[in-house]
Image (cartoon, rainbow, N blue to C red):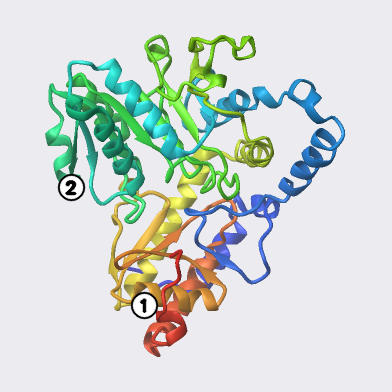
Amino acid sequence: MTKLIRKNFELLDQNDSLAPMRDEFILQEGLIYLDGNSLGVLPKDTANRVNEVIQQQWGVDLIRSWNCHYWMQKPIELGDKVGRLVGAEAGQTLVCDTTSINIFKLAAAAVKMRPDRTKLITETGNFATDLYLLQGLAKLLGDQVQVVALPRDQVLHAIDDDTALVLLTHVHFKTGAMWDMATVTQLAQEKGALMMWDLSHSAGAMPISLDSFNADLAVGCTYKYLNGGPGSPAFVYVAKRHLAQFEQPLTGWLGHAKPFAFNDDYQGAEGIEQAMCGTPSVLANAALEVALDLMLKADMEQVRLKSQHMGKLFIQLIQQRCPWFELGSPINDEQRGSQVSLIHTQGYAIIQALIERNIVGDFRAPDNLRFGFTPLYLKYVDLWDTVDALVDIMSNEHWNQPQFLNKKAVT
């Protein structure tokens, strides 16, 4: 393995075709931000857009803005923009609610679409909300369904003729390990099951082809790689071949075929609009629209190539210079999302020591240090400087201080 030097990374930055995109974001001078896989950076145009919505649309036009500024149509418009980023034709994706709520909607709909099947299959050890929501649905339905949650290497073998739904997170939130979406979808469908993908850790970081891979259902958040802002609305995808059968359980007024008729009986909208429940979050949608328009300027193939290259280089640096860590992510670029995880028993304290140096990664219990690679605003040289800091922190045990060892509420 060729020994890397800082000059190698400086040259990569000089020749990076995505480098101009960095100027579209607000980044504190000297900050190395490796946590875009948890909360993306603020685009420069977001504040002006949201301020315009506040001062003019809300402040002056008031309730007229639902019509003259198309507030009510934003979930559909933004859904189609997300659709372009995840490989979905128009009319199948909607921006609304949260990832957790959308998982519940789709899982309940899937159970009804497969009434003679009882199993809901998912993975243990991945992001917990997916499993929690299936458990909640099963508790609500009683004996009608059962949750089968298994370790990653057992999931696919468990899919059988009694499986109604398989729910998997495309990229593992701790390890970055990535499922082969096309292969897994085909396997589930060959058994007659519906396949739902949680794209929270992959949307905006790589090309995704929901339609081409024949996915049935999908959800995802927009505040990570899509840079929509803290708590920004999630998205929901239902393949058009299922829309006629799709019946979500949260029958709020905006999922009605004629919401402003105010009929006493619910009649669901015919298309993806049925996935709506309550009133759109206008200010959050304004911020998200800026972020999506910015993402749509990027070539997602280039984004993925840079992400893979960054991951590969970071792993090489760790292997060459940091013997204190175990690699917690796949070494194969094709099997790894846009992050690299390291394992250490003092992972929390080490991350806190890095943050004090203005290098922001994050920690996931019990021992996982996560470093997210967001190609639109991360520089190659940031990788070198991060590993430099890690070497100093570990060599001199700078992490072993009370202020770093004391865990905060949000890790």
Determine the secondary structure under disc 2: loop
Residue 143 lies, with reference to residue 147, above or below; the image says above
Which of 332/106 is in front? 106
Determine the secondary structure under disc 1.
helix
- Camera sees residue 211: yes
Q: Quadrant of residue 113?
A: top left
Where in the figure is residue 162, as x and y percent of width and height? 14, 23
Q: Which mark is residue 346?
A: none
Rendered location of residue 402, percent (x, y):
43, 86
Which residue appears at 48% of the width and 45% of the height? 205
> In the rendered image, which residue does mark 2 sit on?
151
Q: Position of residue 128 (x, y in %)?
A: 32, 48
Q: Which quadrant would the N terminus be assigned to in this image?
A: bottom left
Query: 166 and 263: which one is in front?
Result: 263
Quarter of the figure with residue 19: bottom right
Query: Quick check: 69 above or below 320?
Result: above
Depicted 398 relative to depicted 169: above or below: below
Residue 351, placed above or below residue 337: below
Q: Residue sitting at 41 percent across and 55 percent down?
A: 339
At label 1, which amino acid type do we have? Answer: Arg
The reply to whether dot 1 and dot 2 touch (C-beta < 8 Å) is: no
**Residue 388 visible from this viewpoint:** no
Name which of mark 1 and mark 2 comes first in the sequence.
Answer: 2
Three-letter residue code for mark 2? Pro
Q: Can you name the residue that lies furthest to the bottom here?
A: 396
Name the residue carrying label 1. 321
Q: Is residue 194 left or right of residue 259?
A: left
